[in-house]
Amino acid sequence: MTDEALRTLLREDPPRGQAALYDEYANYAYAVIARHIADGATQEDIEDCFVETFTDILPRAAGIIGSIKAYVGTAARHHAIDHGIAIRKRIARTVPLEDAAEPSFSHVEEEVEARARNTALMEAVDALGEPDATILIQKYFYRRKMADIGRMVGLTANAAQVRCSRALKRLRRMLEEV
Amino acid sequence: MNEKEIERMLRHPDDETARRLTEGRPPLDDAAKARLWARIQDEMTSADTVHGEAPVVKRRIWPSLAVAAACVVVFGGTFAGLFSMSRPVVSPEPTVPTAPADIADTLPFAVGERFAADGLTESGTLWITVTSASPVDGDLSAWTVHVTAASEDAVPRGGATQFCADNFLAVKDETIVSPYQCDTDRPGDAHCTFVLKNGQTASLTLYYRFLEDTPSFRLATGTDPACPSVEIKMEGNT
């Protein structure tokens, strides 16, 4: 659906327009939140942030200026940052000092190294094939629960968990050289 | 690379890797989408209800009414004949929402304020000024805020300084004066890059989301809270 069609629907029939906007951008907003929310966020954190984002966007959606996708993405990102502050505080109270990330000093070197690692990771995940690649991404990137992931790939939660552990081990073997 | 490190990288891949990994792998299946939609509708309905106040007031006043009724029965019987009801019952005044007026009063305080952003540069001072603030289409929780950055012979940290702003909706790129760029073409990203030195000035427009508990926004050189930043307070700067 184009932005213009969505805007018209939002003006003429707000409930249907809001449902259409949600349908169009739910996955996108969820992905943006998962990408920007703090490390240590749980599926509940992401879902709370997701619900808050849409509760904030939908009542004013008819008045969005410019690209609706960009608006949804920006709002999702900023809600994720807002939630991230609370999550970091929560984690700071529970994570032992020795587990905290060490400060780095060699930015350029690290960036080049990180880039190479990311490329290797991407290729290795692709090489795992399905459903293992999907299981890993759903678990670690989207932080979804095994029961939900299992339903998505047609496995029980236990079977999905076993596949996930094995996939992680295979991934480690593939990346040992990096 | 050990498993812990792999898990960390899967949680936080760089932009390109994230895009490639998630391509064709949407996070929500139909069941999850429907479940979350139901939650959103619940939230929106309860927000409307609280705004309209009727059901909430009803719930809260029932216990009071029960206690009041009991008191009337007990004391009414005891004092019957001694006192007469001489005054009519006055109904409570209708609730008038006052928040929008409060918000409208607080925002303009930042206009004209000049904020020194020393940490954003290696030398000199970068000044950030809020030049104007006005509500978007009469919606008092969303404001268009014009911000001007001016340097006094300041050299940005590490060359081009990337600005990120917390607690705002979007940067309107049309007002970024060349050679300053704003990469709003990347969905969900509203950073803008300044190359500001030798007395140059740049202006940008922010769509500011006014939140009563955080009446400020932060212009920073990165998304990490540790990055040098300047906080623009939108109230109390009288």
Image (cartoon, rainbow, N blue to C red):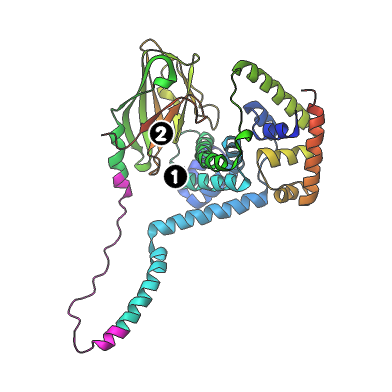
Magenta-drawn stretch contains B96: yes
Q: At which x and y percent is residue B114?
A: 31, 25
Which residue is denoted by mark 1 in the rendering? A60
Residue at left offset 48%, top offset 57%:
B45
The residue at 70%/35% (across/down) is B7
Q: Which element type, helix, strand or loop, lies under badge 1?
A: helix
Q: Is residue B23 visible?
A: no
Q: Is residue A118 left or right of residue A172?
A: left
How many numbered discs sit on the rendered protein?
A: 2
Q: On the image, which quarter does residue B230 sit in? A: top left
Q: Which mark is residue A143?
A: none
Across and down, in percent, residue A106 comes to 61, 17
Q: Which residue is mark 2?
A: B217
Residue at disc 2, secondary structure: strand
Please state the chain letter of the residue tagged with numbered disc 1 in the rendered image: A
Kindly identify the amino acid type of the residue bearing the numbered disc 1: Arg
Magenta stretch in the rendered image: B74-102
Marks 2 and 1 close (CB-CB < 8 Å):
no
User: Badge 1: few (under 14), some or many (20 or more) residues near its Cα, within 10 Å?
Assistant: few
Q: Nearer the viewer, mark 2 or mark 1?
A: 2
Q: Vertical placement of A103 versus B96: above or below?
A: above
Q: Quadrant of the N terminus of chain A?
A: top right
**B153 and A69: which one is in front?**
B153
Counting other residues with Cα less than 10 Å from the Cα at mark 2, is it few (<14), some (14-19), or many (20 or more)? Answer: some
Rounded to the nearest angstrom, the CA distance separating label 2 from label 1 is 21 Å
